[in-house]
Image: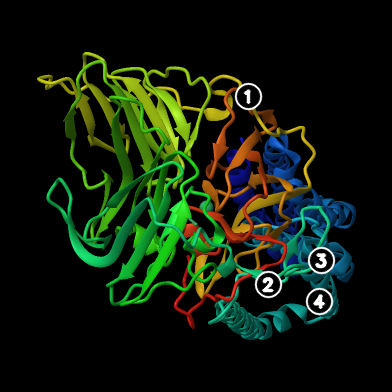
Amino acid sequence: MFEVGENADGILAGVLFLIWLAAAILATRLAWRPTPEALRKSARRLLRLLVAALVVLVVKCVAIGLMLAVDWIFADNRVIVQMPLLLLPMLAVAVWTVPGLRALANRDDAPLDVATRSAAADPRFVVPVQVTAVATVVGVYFAYVSRPVPSYLDDIATHAAPILLSVLVLWFWQGRRLRAATATDFVRRGRRASALRATAQTAVVVLVVAAGIAYVAQSSRLPDRMSMTSHDNVDYGGGPSFGHGGHGGVSVDDLRGPQTGKPNKAFTLTAKNATVRLSSGTEIKALTYNGQSPGPELRVREGDLVEVTLHNEIPDENVTLHWHGLDVPNREDGVAGATQNAVEMGGSFTYRFIAEQVGTFWYHTHQNPLEAIRRGLFGALIVEPRDGPPPGERDVVVMAHEWRTPDDNIVSFGTSDTLQRQEIAPGTPVRLRLINTDNNPSTDSRPRSLTVNGTPVRVAAIDGVDLSGPTPLTDPRFGLATGGRYDVTFTMPANAVRLTDLANRDGGLVLAPPGDTSTPKVVDDGDQFDPLSYGSEGSRPFDAGSSYDRSFTQLLDDRLSFYDGGLHLVPIINGKSFPNTPTLMVRMGDLVKVRIVNRSHQNHPMHLHGHHALVLSRDGVRATGSPWWIDSLDVIPGQIYEIGFKADNPGLWMDHCHNLDHAANGMVMHLAYEGVTSPYELGRGTPNQPE
Ligand code: C2O
Ligand code: CU
């Protein structure tokens, strides 16, 4: 409903502009009509336009009503900023223009005298229409570009200013026209001079606008060096403030995993260029860890001290390792420019951490990730329970990825873009670990949809956290957030089971009993799996009713604007792009609530580093059933999620959209603990481009 309202509202802004532009032109020329009949006709046409404008306005109110029905926050900016600025000039039209216009529309054939012309050129009569036209331009700007955010005071000022200015300018201009219209030789004098003048005026306007656009584009360029902590837009979430940096200064470099002790598991990952062959034979010029992509599967046990040494042998690409979903100490988090410098060609970096969580995770570079992950710098990270996996369990890791060739997007599971088969004996417990490593939610703005057909399955874990009491689902569709993971379990039946990505129905994975060569049909109209009320009630350390030390709101909008010199549909958080997005400031031990409101046109899989958050509610409906812990949460347009987390992992943490196109366009913010500083910088002048 929000999307319908939002899209209609945008289109209607354009329609209103066209109608009022036509009305303004008609009104401005009214006094210059040559004959009584022509004047009457124009006046009638203008009246009809005003009626049409009124109808469109009513439809627009309905569109806004649709958004308001979802939640006040989805259209409060219309009610507070946009509508008053449209309605006030329209009211002036009703009061000052309409009565005179009706008189002109009903005028008889008496010759046009000075009194008539001066009535039709009177600023009080004409300017309201002209100003309303200006207001509708501001309305279009509002709908596509400005996207006001609370408190809206600034926005009211910036939107009202051009309208007020236009009142002055048009009043003055129309005053001169009034004198011209009442001069005896007005018709002849009008034409020529005004044609010339109009051309000159248009040229000036075009020049000024072009210069303005060039200036805005240039000033959107990001600085060559910036610090993730330097910006002064800080948000304390209603909790006590402590000044930027705060007390007890500690550098991210000091927030490390264990420095001593022999690792239980040690890995070496070397970033290198390599050619990866998909099952279809397509070759990808990939960026890889150890020459393969997905990179080597890292499989460890709960409690293991893990040591991973990263080398870089790629000449033109710096790399890091980020453990997506594993809440490691801050210095081990692998974010270029925040927790380390990206590793350049020939360099190395060692990560050490204890694997405290059990479940499905993945690793990827956090340097130029939009390109580099897409091209292959990622792999699976599995933490098995301390006592090992359930006996006899068949563990199948599936990394849903989209490869790019110059002319194709290839939807795959790992390197399999064609149908694969595995034999599994009936009765075997099976765990499918689904990982969405895609940059982009595929072809449209929806999350990836995976379906399992052939047997009912349970969702045993989400984002590396077990669910309580998962119930069986038949032909479910899994809309897996970018970066998100689902562990799907079942006992192998006597027939074949199929996992399919609906974006590649010829591909997928068939698990079949030995000798079974059948291929189950893809069922694509099963129910979308919804974790909000799935499973049985488990224990929640806090819920929607708990009292929180800090509460933040992330208002996700998008607008047509420049970012770093390029024109994009720029996703914004609370009206800003990185590095101007607010930093969420917390103290160790705080209980934190975040309300995520998606007022934009696209899905945003929001990903907070270093923490798992509990989903408290969605669209005002409390989460029930199994506690639903997330590190990657897909928020679709028109949705409001409330999540909560305990601030228990000090550091400087990224909080960003994992649609990495969006992140690259500034949909990035940070969670900063009191007193934590980072010596690292990012930007063109540094080795670090974390997005
Ligand atoms: Cu999967 Cu900030 O990352
Ligand atoms: Cu996004």
Q: Residue flagged by tag 2: what amino acid is it? A: His
Q: Marks 1 and 3, how far apart in space?
A: 44 Å
Rendering colour mode = rainbow
The residue to which callout 1 is attached is 624
Q: Which mark is residue 589?
A: none
Given contact means CB atoms under 8 Å apart, are the residues at marks 2 and 1 in contact? no
Q: Residue flagged by tag 1: what amino acid is it? A: Thr
Mark 2 vs mark 4, foreground winner is: 2
Given contact means CB atoms under 8 Å apart, are the residues at marks 2 and 3 in contact? no
Neighbourhood count class around disc 1 (C-alpha, 10 Å): few under 14, some 14–19, many 20 upward = some
Q: Residue furthest front?
A: 261
Q: Secondary structure at mark 1?
A: loop
Taking the image as shown, residue 657 lies to the left or right of residue 122, namely left
Q: Which mark is residue 157?
A: 3
Q: How many marks?
A: 4
Q: Which mark is residue 169?
A: 4
Mark 4 vs mark 1, foreground winner is: 1
Quick check: 60 above or below 28? Answer: above
Q: Marks 2 and 3, how far apart in space?
A: 24 Å
Q: Secondary structure at mark 3?
A: helix
Q: Residue at x 79, y 68 (%)?
A: 243
Earlier sequence position, callout 2 versus callout 3? 3
Q: Marks 2 and 4, how far apart in space?
A: 39 Å
| Front residue of this view, candidates 248 and 453 | 248
Neighbourhood count class around disc 4 (C-alpha, 10 Å): few under 14, some 14–19, many 20 upward = some
Mark 2 vs mark 3, foreground winner is: 2
- Residue 26 in view of the camera: no
Q: Quadrant of residue 38?
A: bottom right
Q: Residue flagged by tag 3: what amino acid is it? A: Ala
Q: Marks 4 and 1, how far apart in space?
A: 59 Å
Q: Marks 3 and 4, how far apart in space?
A: 18 Å
